[in-house]
Amino acid sequence: MSSFFLRKNRTIKTEHLPDHIAFIMDGNGRWARRRGLPRSVGHREGSYTLRRIAKECSKIGIKYLSVFALSTENWSRPKEEINGLLDLLREFVKSADKEIAENNIRIRFAMSKDRLPEDILQEIDRLVEKTKNIEGMQLIIALNYGGKDEILNAAKGIARDVAAKKIREEDIDQDLFRNYLYLPDVPDPDLIIRPSGEKRISNFYLWQAAYSEFWYSDVLWPDFNKKHLYKALEDYKRRERRYGGIK
Ligand code: FPP
């Protein structure tokens, strides 16, 4: 049975690791404010944390890693902050294939294309295409993403296909519904981690989080490191998942 070393002679068996971890990368703004820096610096630091944590997750054998990078609600932030986030994203998608894909990571996006600039969409297509045959961990970037929008979008797709007689109303079940989500083949997250002391789902993965385990921490995302990750994994290992049943 394979296992990996955690700390102080403690190990976790690979079979006790979550297949899919999702992060709400929260606390960038507060990290910057505490240092008297612009919020954009916090987001940039957050993007470095994302790179470090993605490599670490890939190294220990996590199969899917999702990160909430921009929500459908974030567009209400000041234009300057949004532009800063879009610039960071541009930088990330242009350079990710070198740094991330070299670490055997495939990159995918859970997103609505509405409002995203054309040049970013093109870079995203290029990156997704370029990494599509990588068999290692999948890094899923939830971008311009909202759980409610994703569900509405699926409902509209189903309504269209019923009207076009491609499917029948009686065929609609959870498996069929999943096929209309952004990334139907990605399994639901086993563990959702939210740093920064907030304890909300914030419109992330509403369908997919039905039976996810949650782990919270007061640490701000730019300060999140592999020790915090390991602590979450140790906690997760002890959780008893019943999916509504009994033991
Ligand atoms: C929430 O923190 C974070 C965001 C709205 C953006 C997260 C984006 C990144 C970490 C950039 C990296 C992503 C890519 C793909 C390049 P907040 O700003 O709401 O923090 P606060 O609650 O402390 O104000």
Image (cartoon, rainbow, N blue to C red):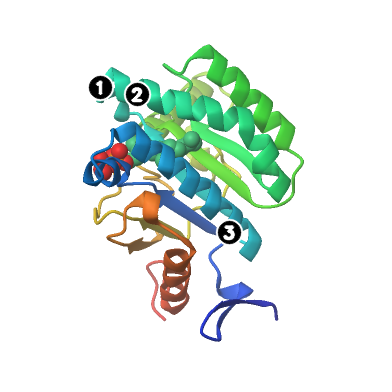
Asked if disc 3 and disc 1 are in contact, CB closer than 8 Å, the reply is no
User: For the residues marked 2 and 1, what is the alpha-carbon distance in whole angstroms?
Assistant: 6 Å
Asked if disc 2 and disc 1 are in contact, CB closer than 8 Å, the reply is yes
Residue located 39% across and 57% down the image: 193
Residue 74 in view: yes
Vertical arrangement, residue 110 with respect to residue 193, above or below: above
Residue 146 in view: no
Is residue 213 rendered to the left or right of residue 129?
A: left
Vertical arrangement, residue 102 with respect to residue 56, above or below: above
Vertical arrangement, residue 39 with respect to residue 195, above or below: above
Residue 239 figure quarter: bottom left
Closer to the camera in the image, 162 or 228? 228
User: For the residues marked 3 and 1, what is the alpha-carbon distance in whole angstroms?
Assistant: 33 Å
What residue does disc 2 label? 82
Q: Which mark is residue 112?
A: none
Which amino acid type is marked by label 3?
Answer: Glu
What residue does disc 3 label? 56
Residue 9 figure quarter: bottom right
Closer to the camera in the image, 70 or 228? 228
Residue located 32% across and 53% down the image: 220
What residue does disc 1 label? 78
Which amino acid type is marked by label 2?
Answer: Ile
Alpha-carbon neighbours of circle 1 within 10 Å: few (<14), some, or many (≥20)? few
